[in-house]
Image: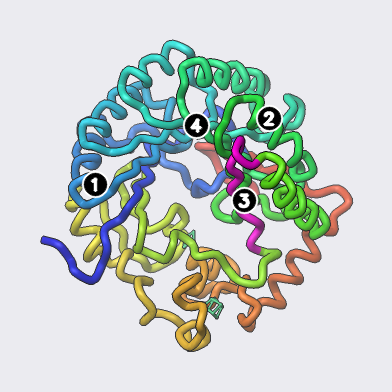
Amino acid sequence: MAEPRIPPPIAMLAELTHRCPLACPYCSNPLELASKDTELSTETWGRVFREAAALGVLQLHLSGGEPAARRDLEELVVRAREAGLYTNLITSGVGLTRARLEALEAAGLDHIQLSVQGVRAEIADRIGGYKGGFARKMELAEHIAELGFPLTLNAVMHRHNLDDLPETLDLALRLGARRIEVACVQFQGWALRNRAALQPSREQVERAKRVVAEARKSRAGRLVIDFVPPDYFADFPKACMGGWGSTGLNVAPDGTVLPCHAAQTIPGLEFQSVATEALADIWYRGPAFMAFRGTDWMPELCRSCDRRDVDFGGCRCQAMALTGDPAATDPVCRKSPQRARLDAIVAAEADYDVPPSFIYRRLRGPVPA
Ligand code: SF4
Ligand code: FES
């Protein structure tokens, strides 16, 4: 049954697993990670892919954690392609081999996004918390290029690597990437826990903007540069998820369907699972998806604002994290009464001579306070 007023989702992020050999402190996964025994089976994922395609999803992003930690990754790609989905693998590269890449090619994988933590082994391995990770990534990138996969490099940037942005862009070209996503860290999940250690300075951010503007000219036709500047230094929030419940959905490793990757940080939302509900029912009628759809939920400040259809009031999870109210105007907005608080956080955190140590992402055990 089609719903006339709610468009279907275009993209689905399938978080196949939270297992990952790396331990990046900037990870947007939740602090409480799903264990292996709660992960959906191959069969169930296959059904979810078919339901997604029937719903209207075109692009499937296979993510995690590290999706290669799933031994059935190749089979999952086969099932996604059979469902008619465009398949994009988002990987750290650690856990993949030449043989597995060849199997993924045979399975019909369309595209690879490879993350890099830094341009040199010393910094990359320190951020990823995995010795030897950088070398393995570089080796894998060679295989990706030889096999002819379209490649996008994912570089999450922060205080510790933002000054290496020119070298990061050079690395993308050297590895044969056609596109690079330079995403300044978004403070969700483990990244929020590590915010003080990761917060860049205003000078770093301004320099990065100049580097991107210049590189877009000098590398035009060779490299597409997607740049996500840091929220906290912007005047207006970004249109998170293109608007809540409007263009995409996430499925967590245990089958919980989420309007965005951090939605479970919002207390009181009622989530449903593909284990018990049809994906279409969840998308069109699920209470979590309905919670912040459209403009009725907005505070008056956003409802009467001419940008309400541009940024949709910003990010609900950020509003929750910074104000305790998920229905507040995103405090990144200059019009928000909470903006001064955000500026104070930036000033305090960007001012450390020696930033705090990382709290590395981990699957088990208590998170240090
Ligand atoms: Fe966006 Fe709301 Fe700020 Fe207007 S008031 S710019 S809609 S966040
Ligand atoms: Fe949840 Fe932005 S991350 S709405």
Callout 1 secondary element: helix
Which residue of the protein is positioned furthest toward the left in this rendering? Answer: 1
User: Decide: marks 4, 2 in contact (CB < 8 A)?
Assistant: no
The disc labelled 2 sits on which kind of residue? Leu
| Magenta residue check for 224 | yes
User: In this rendering, which labeled residue sits more in front, label 1 or label 3?
Assistant: 3
Secondary structure at numbered mark 4: strand
Q: State yes or no: Cβ of the residue under disc 2 lies below 8 Å from any atom of ligand 2.
A: no
Tell me the residue that label 4 is attached to. Answer: 91
Q: Is residue 197 visible?
A: no
**What residue sits right under mark 1 in the picture?**
52
Position of the N terminus, as image quadrant, is bottom left
Q: Is residue 325 above or below residue 7?
A: below
Which residue is nearer to you in this view: 203 or 169? 169
Q: Sequence-wise, which precedes: disc 1 or disc 2?
A: 1
**Separation (CA) of disc 4 from disc 2:** 17 Å
Residue type at the position of mark 4? Thr
Figure disc tally: 4
Q: Amino acid at mark 3?
A: Phe
Q: Which residues are magenta?
A: 220-231
The amino acid sitting under disc 1 is: Ala
Q: Which residue is mark 2?
A: 171
